Image (tube, rainbow, N blue to C red):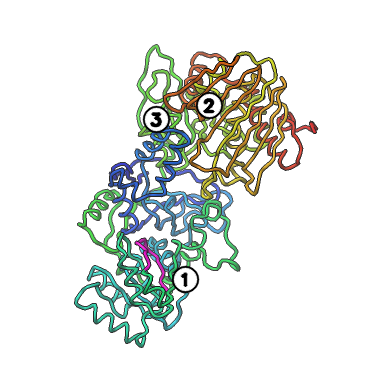
Amino acid sequence: MKIIAQKYRDGSLTLLDVPVPATKAGGVLVRSSYSAISAGTELMKVAESKLSLLGKAKARPDQVRKVLQTLSQQGPLATYQKIANRLDSYTPLGYSLAGVIADVGAEVDGFRAGQRVACGGNQFALHAEFNWVPVNLCVAIPDNVSDEQAAFATVGAIAMQGFRQAEIGLGETAVVIGLGLLGQILVRILRAAGVHAFGIDIDAERCRLAMEGGAAACATKGGAEFEGFVEALRRATSGAGADCIFITAGGDSNEPVELAGELSRDRGRIVDVGKCRADLPWAEYSQKELEFRFSRSYGPGRYDPIYEEQGIDYPIGYVRWTEKRNMASFLDLIAQGRLDLSPLISSIHPFDEAVAVYEDMNAGRSRGIGVLFRYPDAAPKTRMLELRKAPARAGKPRLRLGVIGCGNYASSMLLPHLKGRADVELAEVVTTTPLSGANAAAKFGFASMSTDPARVFDDADIDAVMVLTPHGSHADLVARALRAGKAVFVEKPLAITAEGLQKVVQAAEESSNTRLMVGFNRRFSPLLRKMRAAFGGFDDAQFLHYRINAGALDPASWHADRARQGGRFVGEGCHFVDTASWWFGARPVSASAVSVGVDADNVAATITYDNGASAVISYMTGGDPRYPKELIEVAGHGMTAKLDNFQTGEVWRRGKRKVFRAMAADKGQKDQMLAFVAALRDGTDMPVPFTSLVETTAVTLAAERSIALGRPFSVADIICGERHDVS
């Protein structure tokens, strides 16, 4: 199938061939009929991507803060790799479409194949021939509503939410500043609700279109007719001013906000539905006691992954108008004949012309209000796309890899170490979203890409599978790969539940396949290995303290979904448990842990080992995010070792201090990948014993049990599911 995408580095647009998305539970696969271009939002995104790096930084200060945090915690090399990966990736466009359901996922009620639907979401309703859309971003199209008008449902929902935020009623007066697509729709909604609507824009043609849509008066700011516009508003409100001002304009000018204050009545309401500068003029706003409100996109549920991605609706008794209900309400207005968007449709273009359409709009050669892409009427052909045939390399044994998942960490920290190697062929990449597959194929030269994990399990020519997906899927995918006879590399954690871990162990036992490696990369750090060698023997008891300044988690991050992805200590704490076990050369026996404060991920865990060693892992989420992330201290044998954020280290022995330094923070990802490839290529033992991988995972799960029960918990209890009281 085809999808339009842009490179964020330079803003270049491309129509890509990618696999059809997989049909996942909780959503439907939709074949697009029409998708709407939102000129303001999308062209702003295109324009931003064409800025210099400094310009991009000024446009996105939130991302700059994240970069500075990564720089302070992980060093310049890792930061550069992540930034470069982002810049070189394709990003999608679009967020509003109409289409026909091609397939229905599990756990979905109320939808059927062949049904016409309108869809929203800038991650789901893309300018693409097929999209997988979760149920709460999908609504049925009434029979008497055309696909062309229904394609504007998401933009309509934004206008509906702005209208609701205003709490405006029958007979009141409103001014809409900015008469682009969103403003035009809002004018028509106001008229349908019995509100006297006025409009302002910099374009006279847009003013004319709003007048045709029912506006009482419209004018261009600074135009000859503006005084007449102000007089008309004064007459309509008996000199008081508008009850509500809607700002649907965008840009860096503060003029819309200033104008809103001038046109509003005393104690009026200003609702920001667009994205403009908002430096409120104190004198005007305070003297009138004006109320400034923001409108959150499509409505309640927006930016909430539980609502949007998991499909958990808000009870109507508590939240009357969600984003899905706003979309449905908008389509109902069209079905009742109270809204007609046909005058707003400026042009309809075949999707094959998408790149030229954007270029014309960006260059100002096309200034239409409502622009649609029309898609061919075709069934999905395949969920796999062959990109090239790998060249034969006679006499050189090659490891054929299938990769499932390819997010930012995999793209910046793991796969670059495999690209271009003579002994590795990147055979196939499997991703949830087709564009992720296209990014991986472009960067690393995969021979094919798909959205179906079964392909890599069923392909007899694939030697090994890399599982680089979100945490909750690891155990199931690893078990499937082991049963398929594949060697496996899985990014940590191996499992997020005891049941998942037992599933992996059972699969390994029943298939007699333990060719498994988990991404516990810190034991491969060159600096840490040098320090361990200098520390000496490991016969006597030692004490290790591992302090992690993890920082607070973005609530929108998928890591925050404890129910589906496990807690942060299970997800990341296994790194530090593995490092301690490797340093000691011992096997963990039990874990005792507490969570500190209200954050369940703020954990202090103590681990005992079979050789008498002990490790304390302090996983701290409440510290300064700019403070260095990791510190390790070890004491034993009359020696002390200290590693500071994988950049500097020291070992004290017999009163003498030996200092270790690294050119850049190296947490061992490269050496880890080379060790994995070498073991499979040469047929040697895996770099980390299977039992150690299982025990490390069990420690983090035992720590979670210990927090819940308030006592130490046995590692064997997790692995075997038996009772081993160690209190």
Check whether the beta carbons of the residues at disc 3 and disc 1 lie within 8 A of each other. Answer: no
Extreme residue toward the top, this view: 395
Instruction: Name the side, left or right, on which 426 lies relative to 714.
Output: left
Q: Residues within 10 Å of mark 1 (few under 14, many from 20)?
A: some
Q: Left or right: where does residue 140 sit relative to residue 55?
A: right
The C terminus: image quadrant? top right
Type of amino acid at the residue the image marks with label 2 = Asn
Label 2, secondary structure: give it.
Answer: helix
Looking at the figure, which quarter contains the N terminus?
A: top left
Q: Nearer the viewer, residue 154 or 353?
A: 154
Tell me the SS state at disc 3: loop
In this view of the protein, can residue 85 be seen by the observer?
yes
Going from N to C along the chain, the mark reached first, 3 or 1, is 1
Which circle marks residue 41 in the picture? Answer: none
Mark 1 lies on residue = 164
Which of the two discs, 2 and 3, sits closer to the camera? 2
Q: Position of residue 411 (x, y in %)?
A: 43, 34
Q: Secondary structure at mark 1?
A: helix
| Residue kind at label 3, given as amino acid type | Phe
